Amino acid sequence: MSTSRLLWSSMTITAALALSACSQSNEAGDAETNADTAAGTASKTLRIATEGAYPPFNYTNADGSLAGYDVDVANALCAQMQADCEIVAQDWDGIIPGLLAQKYDAVVAGMSITPERQEKVDFTEPYFANTMVWLTNTDSGFDPNAIQNLTLGGQRSTTPGAYLQENYKGKEGNTVQLYDNYDNAYLDLKSGRSDAVLAEKVSAKSWLTDNPEGFGIVGDEIDNDDNIAIAVRKGDPLRDEFNQALSEIRSNGELARLEQANFDQ
């Protein structure tokens, strides 16, 4: 074999090897690019806590599933943020400690913005504004302008509960009884162990839907500037993402539709 032919053969093999290496490199690069693209477009998962015992804001169905206005708002926000929503139930008293312990990313649970809570967590813009009402037996003669020697019920760690403690506990012979949830407060009202319950209007109206006989809202609504928002950990950029999504579902009418569906306003 001539020297020129040997040289040509060697060059051909070298070129083939180079092309093969280049092809493999391109394939590896394409695979990395595809993986990066897939990772970039994959939905993130947001783990959100709610109480599951505060209808119509949040409650637990017979099958164990969670429902209510808070759950609907959380799902709408996750959809707007292109995130997967994982909603979990958490007892009210442990809901902020659980957030701080990173058991979940946010709390959507009918939670009012208060100075005490703002020391521990950051809040988004409000997604609902509450008013308080007195719920009582309509034959009891309860007069919200002359509350004396009565047992008053509410839920602890809520704005109505704080209002009761501040304005009625130990005053004019009144007793304030706070419960873990409103269901227990309403049970004692129904059984006559308390004279009235101070609750958020939507919660009271929801209970009256199933208990219309003999009970009702008495007196005027009490506006105590009670704004409900989403809680996240201090400094978490998720707060800004929620605010942007809230702005979107407010602008497109979704938030109003969810209010109508859950509160019949």
Image: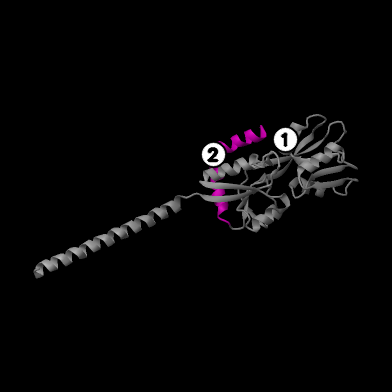
Q: Please name the amino acid that badge 2 sits on.
A: Ser
Answer with left or right where residue 192 lies relative to residue 232.
right
Picture layout, residue 232 above or below residue 1: above
Q: Earlier in the sequence, mark 1 or mark 2?
A: 1
Measuring from the top left, give residue 94's x and y in whole percent: 71, 53
Q: Residues within 10 Å of mark 1 (few under 14, many from 20)?
A: some
Q: Is residue 196 visible?
A: no
Q: Is residue 19 visible?
A: yes
Span of residues in magenta = 236-265
Seen from the viewer's position, the closer of residues 241 and 181 is: 181
Answer with left or right where residue 79 lies relative to residue 128.
left
Answer with left or right where residue 195 lies relative to residue 183.
right
The residue under label 1 is 206
Residue 251: mark: 2
What residue do we see at 59% from left, 38% from top?
255
Q: State if disc 2 and disc 1 touch (CB < 8 Å).
A: no
Q: Please name the amino acid that badge 1 sits on.
A: Ser
Prevailing secondary structure class for the magenta stretch in the rendered image:
helix
Q: Residues within 10 Å of mark 2 (few under 14, many from 20)?
A: few
**Magenta stretch: includes residue 38:** no
Per the image, label 1 sits on a secondary structure element best described as: helix
Measuring from the top left, give residue 60's x and y in whole percent: 68, 41
Measuring from the top left, give residue 204's x and y in whole percent: 75, 37
